[in-house]
Image (tube, rainbow, N blue to C red):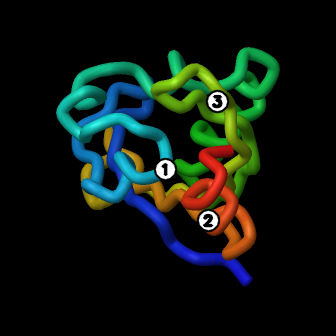
Amino acid sequence: MIWDLFFATHEINGNYKWISPEIEGILGYKPLDLIGKNAYDLFYTEDSLRILRTHINTRTKSQEVTYRIRKKDGKYIWVKTFARESNNDDILEVTIKLNLLQIISYRLFGI
């Protein structure tokens, strides 16, 4: 079972344009902490190239990628992203999804 958890839009280069408030409950950041910042600064280094390839391929169709992203406390968590190009060619619409077990673990144990 997969659940939508938060949404974001960012430019192809990774700069966040908009982030839903739900991000704070999972990653610990307030949306304004990240607006204008680069999403790639939060990605686990070994995952960055794969994410970039996915974002480039989003120009032709929606893409899905699983990767690690850094929380405000410095810990990394696994997320699954569904990205698609918006009506504006330079903006990606991103949905971050977590399964129910991940959500319970983050809420109860902070992991």
User: Cα distance, mark 1 to mark 2?
Assistant: 8 Å
> Residue 29: x and y, percent?
35, 35
As shown in the figure, which amino acid type bears the numbered disc 2? Answer: Ile
Residue 97 percent coordinates (x, y): 59, 64
Whether residue 61 is visible, yes or no, is: no
Name the residue carrying label 2: 103
- Residue drawn where x is 58% and y is 40% of the image: 55
Give the image location of residue 2, x and y in percent. 67, 77
The answer to whether marks 1 and 2 mark residues whose Cβ atoms lie closer than 8 Å is yes
* Precedes in sequence: disc 1 or disc 2: 1
Find the residue positioned furthest to the right.
Answer: 46
Work out which quarter of the rendered image holds the N terminus and state it: bottom right
Question: In the image, what residue occupies the spot 28% across and 55% down?
Answer: 20
Is residue 106 left or right of 22 when viewed as pictured?
A: right
Q: Secondary structure at mark 3?
A: helix
The residue sitting at the left extreme is 32
Residue of label 3: 52
At a point 43% along the width and 33% down the height, the residue shown is 12
> What residue is shown with label 1?
26
Q: Residue at x 26, y 54 (%)?
A: 21
